[in-house]
């Protein structure tokens, strides 16, 4: 299915939207400023996933079969025994070792973040680090060749396995003992393309080992690519028809990455110069706002409601006022099919993970139940994040799981609120500040040469000014004639305005 990638870069954050058939299919955010200046602003959104860090083992807990590792972050990282196995000198046929065979308190260990910190939990770690390239993933501490499950053609699987084994045997740039996972992007790639990708990963691994030798614990010895380059690496495929970037520097980074690893994608990169904002043209801002609401309308007039708890996320399906003329079973079937098709998209967009329970409208016919489950499976099949679906229970409930890889959008953008008129959540200071900065960016484009003034609640102004002089200087490039902030005590947190400074 033809898709477009829209990359919006602002002073506050980088946002990447995947659009299929003029409809948002995935959205990713990465904020680019510090979060903690004494305000209640929630998590900053900085991504740790994929970073390789040199940490110090704080505690070893045999009862949990895990260790806590000091990474220099607010909370220690969690290293389970199964993720520390490569640190133990054990034969390959042995099952998961005891954590005490892998690490001891005080050990310096090289680990990789495999799951960002979520809520009150620290980052999940693995000692079996990996390096992702465009075509393959290198596993320095584990030999062998594996292939993506999405590569289904047996002939292509044999071809790719043979190429990788040949490179391992003949190329001195391949680290001793390293293994590889072949990515879907390698389909129909040439041997030279794959060898070049492997060579780049080998050079990067040697650099990491050099930084490890020189580092003082704790330290980050490898940062995964920035969000623009990461999108080029992981998000661009043969279905991508164009990549539109609204920032010249970011577009230059995208082109540089394409030149190194995927020259065929160079012609797809475009710079958006307005007149309007890139997300406004596709109505994506409105879609993002809708993702913070629990209810999602369905085409027939029904709706689904998504609500999260500490234990699980519930999805309730309601037919609303819709009634099929042929009867209740047909009404329930159509509503359930529409809901099943939308649920996968909503889980991706909202970043919902963990246990999910879907309360479909009751169906009597087994073939109708099978139809709903088939549509649900197809809906989640487009997801890059692993999911698992169980059969429908006698009560019409379907249990499924989706791997947690990041905070849900609702937790990233909002926080619990007592006096917010029953809604239950309020946008964080960080989220409102990011919206204000995008408004400044828009007004600066619409009023070139005008001095601007931004009015906001005092806590928003304090937060922005607390980011430091370098950030403020960067911000003023969007209003070169002048920009100042004015706190308005009467404004509630979500309120702000930007106008000409008279």
Image (tube, rainbow, N blue to C red):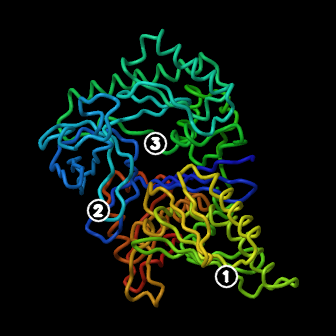
Point out residue 49 in the picture as x, y percentages from the top left corner.
40, 47
Q: Residues within 10 Å of mark 3 (few under 14, many from 20)?
A: few
Name the residue located 15 percent from the left edge and 38 percent from the top edge.
107
Camera-side residue of 125 and 102: 102
Q: Are marks 3 and 1 in contact (CB under 8 Å)?
A: no
In the rendered image, which quarter is residue 439 located in? bottom right
Q: Which residue is mark 2?
A: 36
Q: CA distance from mark 2 to mark 1?
A: 41 Å
Q: Are marks 2 and 3 in contact (CB under 8 Å)?
A: no
Name the residue located 55 percent from the left edge and 43 percent from the top edge.
231
Name the residue located 51 percent from the left edge and 61 percent from the top edge.
401
Q: Is residue 275 above or below residue 205?
A: below
Q: Which residue is mark 3?
A: 226
Numbered badge on residue 318: 1
Point out residue 121 in the picture as x, y percentages from the top left corner.
30, 60
Point out residue 55 in the picture as x, y percentages from the top left corner.
22, 41
Camera-side residue of 375 and 286: 375
Which numbered mark, 3 or 1, is in the foreground of this view?
1
Q: Residues within 10 Å of mark 2 (few under 14, many from 20)?
A: some
- Decide which of tag 2 and tag 1 comes sooner along the chain: 2
Q: CA distance from mark 3 to mark 1?
A: 41 Å
Q: Is residue 267 above or below residue 241?
A: above
């Amino acid at each position: 299915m033809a898709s477009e990638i829209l990359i919006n870069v602002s002073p506050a954050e980088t946002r990447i939207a995947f659009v299929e058939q003029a409809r948002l299919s995935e959205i990713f955010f990465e904020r680019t400023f510090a979060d903690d200046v004494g305000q209640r602003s929630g998590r900053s959104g900085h991504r740790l996933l994929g970073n390789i860090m040199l940490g110090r083992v704080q505690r070893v807990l045999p009862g949990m079969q895990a260790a806590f590792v000091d990474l220099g972050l607010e909370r220690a990282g969690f290293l389970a025994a199964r993720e520390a196995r490569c640190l133990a000198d054990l034969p390959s046929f042995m099952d998961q070792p005891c954590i005490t065979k892998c690490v001891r308190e005080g050990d310096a260990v090289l680990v990789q973040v495999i799951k960002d910190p979520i809520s009150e939990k620290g980052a999940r770690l693995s000692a079996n680090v990996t390096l992702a390239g465009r075509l393959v993933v290198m596993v320095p501490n584990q030999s062998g060749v594996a292939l993506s499950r999405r590569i289904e053609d047996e002939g292509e699987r044999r071809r790719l396995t043979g190429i990788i084994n040949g490179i391992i045997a003949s190329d001195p740039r391949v680290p001793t003992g390293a293994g590889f996972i072949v990515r879907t992007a390698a389909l129909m790639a040439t041997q030279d393309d794959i060898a070049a990708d492997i060579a780049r990963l080998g050079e990067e691994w040697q650099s990491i080992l050099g930084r490890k030798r020189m580092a003082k614990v704790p330290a980050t010895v490898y940062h995964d690519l920035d969000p623009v380059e990461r999108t080029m690496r992981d998000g661009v495929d043969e279905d991508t028809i164009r990549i539109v970037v609204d920032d010249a520097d970011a577009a230059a980074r995208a082109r540089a990455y394409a030149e190194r690893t995927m020259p065929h994608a160079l012609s797809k990169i475009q710079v958006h110069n307005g007149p309007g904002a890139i997300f406004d043209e596709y109505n994506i801002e409105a879609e993002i706002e809708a993702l913070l609401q629990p209810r999602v309308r369905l085409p027939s007039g029904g709706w689904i409601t998504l609500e999260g708890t500490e234990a699980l996320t519930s999805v309730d399906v309601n037919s609303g006022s819709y009634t099929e003329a042929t009867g209740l079973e047909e009404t329930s079937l159509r509503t359930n099919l529409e809901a099943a098709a939308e649920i996968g998209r909503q889980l991706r967009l909202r970043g919902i993970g963990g246990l999910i329970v879907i309360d479909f409208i009751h169906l009597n016919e087994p073939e109708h139940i099978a139809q709903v489950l088939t549509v649900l499976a197809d809906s989640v099949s487009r997801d890059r994040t692993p999911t698992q679906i169980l059969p429908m229970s006698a009560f019409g409930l379907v249990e499924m799981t989706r791997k947690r890889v990041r905070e849900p959008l609702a937790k990233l953008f909002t926080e619990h609120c007592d006096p917010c008129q029953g809604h239950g959540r309020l946008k964080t200071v960080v989220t409102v500040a990011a919206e204000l900065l995008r408004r400044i960016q828009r007004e600066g484009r619409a009023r070139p040469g005008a001095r601007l003034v931004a009015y906001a609640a005092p806590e928003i102004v304090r937060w922005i000014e607390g980011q430091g002089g370098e950030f403020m200087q960067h911000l003023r490039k969007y209003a070169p004639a002048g920009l100042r902030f004015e706190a308005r005590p009467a404004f509630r947190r979500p309120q702000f305005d930007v106008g000409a400074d008279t």
